[in-house]
């Protein structure tokens, strides 16, 4: 009973938040609604017993990603109202609804329920975080490391793209060249 | 012995390919010489095979390789040398050797010298396939091959419009007939399950006579086209636009006799259906008379000889239709010798007269062209059937056969035609070689042909004189395979009256021709009363048959074609194709706007694509889920 | 009133559809990124739910990697966005038509 109430409550809240995100003309509202939606989604993870995933959701999305977006928004000065020319709304809504209906039709097909066999069954008597750790560092070790490298690459890429004068390498320069660069900066 | 078979078959192919290497280069004498040597090699190999068969050897049957083998259909490239094919091989290789050597002189000044030999040798190869094949499919390949080479050689001087027209006419007429032939071959396969001669003929007696009749009729339609029988005869006279050696080889001695060969080869079939045989004989007799009558008044030397060929082909069909296959084959052989000689002589005359063809503009040539005169006279005597030349033996046997089979109408027609033959042959000889020298008006200085050309012709001259002595050995050779029997007129008196009567009749015709034309002095200009008489005009215009074809078949066909072109092809077929192209082009033109470079639009399209894919997934999922019901539903609809 | 897998799947689908609306509707690149985050989260819910109802951890693993990828996507995407903004002083999609065919 409690589960049902929690599900419907959070479902309602998530849908509302995300709806605001895609419809509001204020970027700040959108950002706030998105952050709230992310937190509500972590509630589903907790309900489903995926504690670790819920924690990661809050930390990564609401913590890191939202902070990044917030900085981005300050950078772009998007706090003012966003003007957007809109095309045909019926096409947008129609296509989305159609996609949703079709996905539901696919999900409602009986093949989903019968034929799936658990590849890595959950272990009884162990906490979710421990389970995840066991699977993640045994079966998914290589993908995990690859994901780590990917994050590193993304970080480097983000810095390189956003930073200034990243084509210069101070370590490879002689002292005189560094001085020259400094002078330039002062002059400019 | 197989070795000789392959040599005989493939030497002409080698010759053709070798000459074909030089078709784009100026005249090279050695192509002609090498081609002649290779054809002569083929002749020697054929002679060895003939001796083998004459000595009573078994027919040689080889299978070169499998051509088609699918399901029950098995067609090999098989070749057979038996009594019939070896006769044809001898005729083909002998005449073509002589024609090759002769052509070295005749085509001396022609730019297409090398090309000529390539075509000519290719023709010999096709003809060898035609006569040596042991099944109808191989025969058909050769049949089409000779048709193609004939097309190339009639239109050899392709810069002359009339030559290309004539070659196309010959080709198209032959296609019409080949359709009949193909149907015949299909019927054979359909009803017997094989195309091998021996197997098919072995099964034929068990078929019902209606089927056999149809097979016989359709095969004979093919023969009618190739042998230019009425009503498909017009191409042969027009084919004379080709070089004269071609006329001698293809349109007198070999290719046009392929129809006769087909009937002789299928003798076991035609023996089963005497009604069709009688029709063939009647048509043959009719064509003999019909063609001879057109030759009476024609003023084109080569056309006269062409009509005479047509007439003689009629004789052969008459004999074959009456069941006297060996007589037909023998006449085919003898006719090849003297008709080739006649044509090559005509070629000499043409050369001397600078391609003048009207015998009325010649006259008195015997002084300058003594040997040609002798050869053509003897060839004409042989053609007329005067004792003891070749034609006497072959043609008289046909007459005897007709008499002995009690077909007196056919006999009468053929006898009368023999008189006409003698008349027009000697009309030609008299006009060319006797009388006043009318060519002087036109300022021509004739000269005799090269000596080696005359020497090359001499074997034909000898054969035209003595071929009659081969009658007995030939009969002995083919007796078994053609179930031949000699034709005996019951009373000796009748026989002698017939022989002497025929000879007298023919001799009188010759004398009349000489009397009328040997002293001819003027070139007719279309004003004399005889030239304006009804019969003269009728004959001179070939019974208006070409005119009839032109007006009632070619023109309506052309109009129908144009109608279909403008109405059906342009408005329906082309419009459909253009429409499809237009749809594709229009779609591209419209969808090009999708590529606006606007990310938002692209995202919309992406979502549309996603929806499309999801829709497909649902559709296929449903189809897989309800496949049984769908099959039931479709089968109820009758799909 | 038992909450089953289908409930979660339908919720996931609805959120996904909202995300699609955003993807198609948004002309501001930053807000477009928000919409993609919604799409990813919608899928994550489905993964986690399937993982729970089948007692299989694979779904959670996938959701985990999806989060990792989303994080790196944001990092690179924002970097690119900054470069673009420096050049054109605009992050409006309709101005972004250099890919015009």
Image (cartoon, coloured by chain):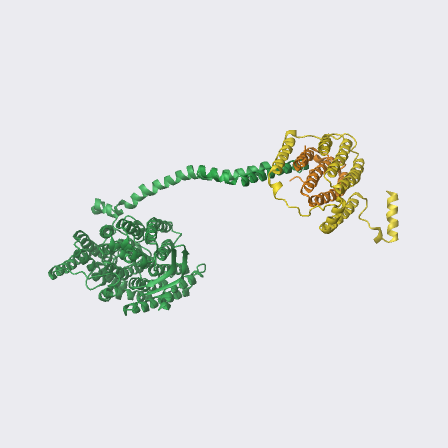
Chain colours: A yellow, B green, C orange
Q: Which quarter of the image is occupied by the N terminus of chain B? A: bottom left
The residue nearer to you, when weighing B219 against A123, is A123
> In the image, residue B130 lies at what x, y percent?
34, 58
Nearer to the camera, B590 or C45: C45
Side of B421 where B102 appears, left or right: right
Q: Is residue A26 visible?
A: yes
Whether residue B251 can be seen here = no
Q: Quadrant of residue B136?
A: bottom left
Q: Is residue B168 above or below residue B368?
A: above
Report which quarter residue B601 is drawn in: top right
Q: Is residue B496 left or right of residue B566?
A: left
Quarter that holds the C terminus of chain B: top left
| Residue B334 percent across, percent down from the top left | 25, 61
Q: Position of residue B80 (x, y in %)?
A: 33, 63
Q: Is residue B132 above or below residue A76?
A: below
Tell whether B26 sits left or right of B61.
Answer: right
Residue nearest the observer in this picture, B222 or A31: A31
Q: How many marks?
A: 0
Task: Depth check: give the residue in front, B299 or A73.
Answer: A73
Q: Which residue is the extreme one toward the front? A: A125
Q: Is residue B67 left or right of residue C99?
A: left
Position of residue B424 measured from the top left corner of the image (x, y, whole percent): 22, 54
């Amino acid at each position: 009973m409690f589960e049902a109430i929690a599900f419907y409550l959070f479902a309602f809240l998530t849908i509302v938040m995300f709806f605001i995100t895609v419809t509001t003309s204020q970027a700040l509202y959108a950002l706030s609604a998105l952050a709230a939606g992310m937190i509500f989604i972590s509630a589903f993870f907790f309900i489903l017993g995926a504690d670790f995933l819920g924690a990661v959701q809050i930390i990564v999305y609401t913590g890191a990603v939202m902070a990044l977006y917030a900085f981005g928004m300050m950078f772009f000065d998007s706090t003012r109202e966003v003007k957007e020319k809109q095309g045909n709304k019926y096409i947008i809504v129609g296509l989305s609804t159609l996609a949703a209906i079709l996905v539901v039709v696919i999900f409602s097909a009986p093949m989903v329920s019968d034929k799936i066999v658990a590849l890595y069954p959950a272990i009884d008597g162990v906490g979710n975080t421990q389970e995840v750790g066991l699977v993640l560092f045994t079966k998914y070790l290589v993908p995990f490391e690859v994901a780590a490298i990917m994050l590193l690459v993304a970080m480097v890429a983000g810095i390189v793209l956003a930073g200034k004068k990243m084509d210069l390498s101070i370590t490879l320069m002689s002292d005189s060249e560094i001085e020259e660069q400094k002078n330039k900066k002062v002059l400019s | 012995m197989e070795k000789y078979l392959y040599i005989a078959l493939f030497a002409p192919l080698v010759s053709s390919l070798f000459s074909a290497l030089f078709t784009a280069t100026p005249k090279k004498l050695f192509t002609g010489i090498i081609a002649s040597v290779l054809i002569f090699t083929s002749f020697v190999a054929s002679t060895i095979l003939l001796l083998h068969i004459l000595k009573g050897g078994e027919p040689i049957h080889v299978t070169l390789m499998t051509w088609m083998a699918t399901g029950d259909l098995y067609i090999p490239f098989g070749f057979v040398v038996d009594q019939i094919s070896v006769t044809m091989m001898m005729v083909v290789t002998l005449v073509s050797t002589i024609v090759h050597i002769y052509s070295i002189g005749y085509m001396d000044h022609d730019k297409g010298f090398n090309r000529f030999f390539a075509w000519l040798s290719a023709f010999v190869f096709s003809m060898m396939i035609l006569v040596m094949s042991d099944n109808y499919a191989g025969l058909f390949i050769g049949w089409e091959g000779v048709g193609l080479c004939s097309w190339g050689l009639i239109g050899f001087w392709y810069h002359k419009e009339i030559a290309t027209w004539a070659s196309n006419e010959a080709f198209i007429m032959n296609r019409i007939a080949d359709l009949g032939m193909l149907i015949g071959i299909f019927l054979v396969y359909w009803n017997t399950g094989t195309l091998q001669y021996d197997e098919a003929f072995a099964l034929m007696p068990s078929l019902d006579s209606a089927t056999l009749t149809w097979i016989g009729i359709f095969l004979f339609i093919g023969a009618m086209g190739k042998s230019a029988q009425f009503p498909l005869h017009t191409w042969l006279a027009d084919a004379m636009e080709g070089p004269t050696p071609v006329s001698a080889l293809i349109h007198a001695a070999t290719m046009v006799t392929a129809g006769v060969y087909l009937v002789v080869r299928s003798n076991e079939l035609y023996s089963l259906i005497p009604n069709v045989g009688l029709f063939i004989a009647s048509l043959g007799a009719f064509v003999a008379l019909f063609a001879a009558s057109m030759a009476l008044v024609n003023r084109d030397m080569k056309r006269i000889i062409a009509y005479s060929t047509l007439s003689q082909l009629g004789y052969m069909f008459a004999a074959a239709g009456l069941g006297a296959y060996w007589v037909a084959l023998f006449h085919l052989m003898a006719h090849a010798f003297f008709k080739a000689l006649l044509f090559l002589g005509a070629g000499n005359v043409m050369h001397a007269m600078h391609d003048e063809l009207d015998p009325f503009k010649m006259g008195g040539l015997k002084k300058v062209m003594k040997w040609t005169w002798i050869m053509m006279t003897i060839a004409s005597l042989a053609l007329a059937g005067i004792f003891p030349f070749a034609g006497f033996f072959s043609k008289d046997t046909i007459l005897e056969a007709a008499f002995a089979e009690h077909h007196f109408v056919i006999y009468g027609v053929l006898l009368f035609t023999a008189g006409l033959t003698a008349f027009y042959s000697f009309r030609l000889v008299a006009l060319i070689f006797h009388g006043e020298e009318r060519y002087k008006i036109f300022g021509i200085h004739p000269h005799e042909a090269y000596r080696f050309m005359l020497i090359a012709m001499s074997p034909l001259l000898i054969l035209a004189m003595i071929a009659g002595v081969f009658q007995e050995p030939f009969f002995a050779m083919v007796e078994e395979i053609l179930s031949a029997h000699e034709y005996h007129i019951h009373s000796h008196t009748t026989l002698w009256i017939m022989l002497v009567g025929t000879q007298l009749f023919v001799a009188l015709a010759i004398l009349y021709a000489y009397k009328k034309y040997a002293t001819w002095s003027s070139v007719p200009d279309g004003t004399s009363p005889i030239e304006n008489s009804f019969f003269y005009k009728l004959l001179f215009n070939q019974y208006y048959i070409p005119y009839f074809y032109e007006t009632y078949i070619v023109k309506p066909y052309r109009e129908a074609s144009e109608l279909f072109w403008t109405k059906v092809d342009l408005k329906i077929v082309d419009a459909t194709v253009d429409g499809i192209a237009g749809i594709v082009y229009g779609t591209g033109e419209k969808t090009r706007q999708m590529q606006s470079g606007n990310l938002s639009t692209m995202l919309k399209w992406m979502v549309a694509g996603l929806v499309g894919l999801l829709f497909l997934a649902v559709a296929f999922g449903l189809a897989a889920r309800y496949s049984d019901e769908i099959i039931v539903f479709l089968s109820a609809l009758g799909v | 009133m038992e909450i089953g897998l289908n409930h979660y799947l339908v919720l996931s689908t609805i959120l996904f559809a909202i995300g699609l609306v955003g993807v198609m509707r948004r002309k501001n690149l930053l807000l477009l990124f928000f919409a993609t985050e919604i799409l990813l989260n919608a899928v994550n819910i489905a993964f986690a739910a399937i993982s729970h109802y089948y007692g299989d951890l694979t779904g959670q693993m996938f959701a985990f990697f999806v989060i990792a990828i989303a994080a790196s996507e944001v990092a690179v995407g924002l970097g690119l966005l900054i470069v673009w903004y420096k050049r054109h002083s605009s992050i409006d999609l309709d101005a972004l038509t250099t890919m015009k065919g």
